[in-house]
Image: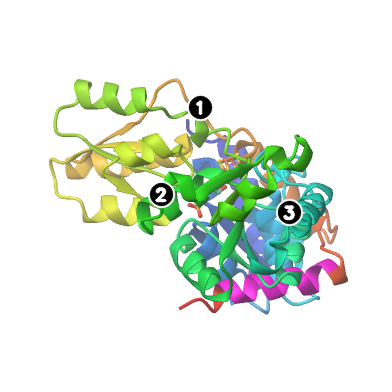
């Protein structure tokens, strides 16, 4: 939908007034009305890497969700201030692993006698506390674009991996990309005593998957894939690795948001695509590539937007930019120093992956 011209003008004016003092980052799942003001757009890896690209910018306005803004704060200098235009833009997946639950899990692994063999690998979609836990215990962060490399690295450091909080990314990477079997994976449920696992099960497992998932990607089903193939003959199914294992196993292509965009850029005219990821991105890509004769549809019409990504809308962005232009620092995301030090260790291990 077209954005309100008055708000567009206000955002433009505030951004112009701020000049080099502001750097706006936008995740691919953001609304069109917001993404048009981003200086850089990207997947979560690219945004983590690029957050520090403008050391002269006093403010980094992060159009994305809370864990991304925390990561940007961790990876930039102390005098750069990260702003999240709506503080309610969280991530339900990141909320599925709390520091307390993860500490309890580590006790369970210690009790089972395997903690020394376990390397934690945490998905970017986690709180700074979880990233700090990961750094403290010799682990790394990964995103959907480097999960394979992160797991290869982790299995050079130890025999087992505790993967959190997205069970699907962990399972899909281990099984689809690395040839492990489903039996090599167990699921740790933080709501059950001992994670719902026996010590024997923990000892036998190679991948201990945290019982977390994305509420958006978790809704695509094998039926979605079968239906779209029946409806559109010759369609290529391209999905994000946060989708469930049976969806990923049935898909033709699997990858991060950046991979999805690159794949469609390289696709020939006349090709047909069904995309299983967040709707703002799919709509934008469908509009962008329609003139080139590429037909792009949403994998399952009953799945909706990521509601927290969508919280960052043009009114919130205008409010944040105008406040900053008037010298009011609003909605700052600041990770405490101790958490930051350990979380940074884990993030830097990711950035150093081959
Ligand atoms: P990527 O952009 O890294 O593919 O991540 C997807 C996601 O769900 C972010 O919340
Ligand atoms: Fe979290 Fe899923 Fe939304 Fe990404 S799409 S922010 S993983 S709920």
Q: Residue at horizontal 21%, vertical 21%?
A: 231
Whether 349 is among the magenta residues is yes
Closer to the camera in the image, 113 or 234: 113
- Foreground: disc 3 or disc 2: 2
Residue 113 as seen in the image, left or right of residue 328: left
The residue lying at 76 percent from left, 35 percent from top is: 191
Pointer 3 local density, CA inside 10 Å: few below 14, some 14–19, many at least 20: many
Q: Secondary structure at mark 1?
A: loop
Q: Earlier in the sequence, mark 1 or mark 2?
A: 2
Task: Tell how many labels.
Answer: 3
Task: Rate crowding at label 2 as few (under 14), some (14 to 19) or many (20 or more) other CA atoms within 10 Å.
Answer: few
Quick one: quadrant of the C terminus? bottom left
On the rendering, which quadrant does ligand 2 occupy?
A: top right
Could you say which disc has been placed on residue 325 in the image? none
Q: Is residue 195 visible?
A: yes
Image spot of residue 109 (x, y percent): 73, 56
Labels 1 and 3: the sequence-earlier one: 3
Residue tagged 1: 304
Above or below 250: residue 346: below
Sequence-first tag of 3 and 2: 3
* Disc sitting over residue 127 in the figure: 3
Above/below status of 68 relative to 7: below
- CA separation in Å, label 3 and label 2: 29 Å
- Helix, strand or loop at disc 2? loop
Q: Position of residue 157 (x, y in %)?
A: 57, 75
Give the residue pinned by disc 2. Answer: 181
Is 341 included in the stretch rendered in magenta?
yes
| Badge 3 element | loop
Q: Which region is colored magenta? A: 339-350
Residue visible at 14% across and 28% down?
233
Q: Is there CB contact under 8 Å for labels 3 and 2? A: no
């Amino acid at each position: 939908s077209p954005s309100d011209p008055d708000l567009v003008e206000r955002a433009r004016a505030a951004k112009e007034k701020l000049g080099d003092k502001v750097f706006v980052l936008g995740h691919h799942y953001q609304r069109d009305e917001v993404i048009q003001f981003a200086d850089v757009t990207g997947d979560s890896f690219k945004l983590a890497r690029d957050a520090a690209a403008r050391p002269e910018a006093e403010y980094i306005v992060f159009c994305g969700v809370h864990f991304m803004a925390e990561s940007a704060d961790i990876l930039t200098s102390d005098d750069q201030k990260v702003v999240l235009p709506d503080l309610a833009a969280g991530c339900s997946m990141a909320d599925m692993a709390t520091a307390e639950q993860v500490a309890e899990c580590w006790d369970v692994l210690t009790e089972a006698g395997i903690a020394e063999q376990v390397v934690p690998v945490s998905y970017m979609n986690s709180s700074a506390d979880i990233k700090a836990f990961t750094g403290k215990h010799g682990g790394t962060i990964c995103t959907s674009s480097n999960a394979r490399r992160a797991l290869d690295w982790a299995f050079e450091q130890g025999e087992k991996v505790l993967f959190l909080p997205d069970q699907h990314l962990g399972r899909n990477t281990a099984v689809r990309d690395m040839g492990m079997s489903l039996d090599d994976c167990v699921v740790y449920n933080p709501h059950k005593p001992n994670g719902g696992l026996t010590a024997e099960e923990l000892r036998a497992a190679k991948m201990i998957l945290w019982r977390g998932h994305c509420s958006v990607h978790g809704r695509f089903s094998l039926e979605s894939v079968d239906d779209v193939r029946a409806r559109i003959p010759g369609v290529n199914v391209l999905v994000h690795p946060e989708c469930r294992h049976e969806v990923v196993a049935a898909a033709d292509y699997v990858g991060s948001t950046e991979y999805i965009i690159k794949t469609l850029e390289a696709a020939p005219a006349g090709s047909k695509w069904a995309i299983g990821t967040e709707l703002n991105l799919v709509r934008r890509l469908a509009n962008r590539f329609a003139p080139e004769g590429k037909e792009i549809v949403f994998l399952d019409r009953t799945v909706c937007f990521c509601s927290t990504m969508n919280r960052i809308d043009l009114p919130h962005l205008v409010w944040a930019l105008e406040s900053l232009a008037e010298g009011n620092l609003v909605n700052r995301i600041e990770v405490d120093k101790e958490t930051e030090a350990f979380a940074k260790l884990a993030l830097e291990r990711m950035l150093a992956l081959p």
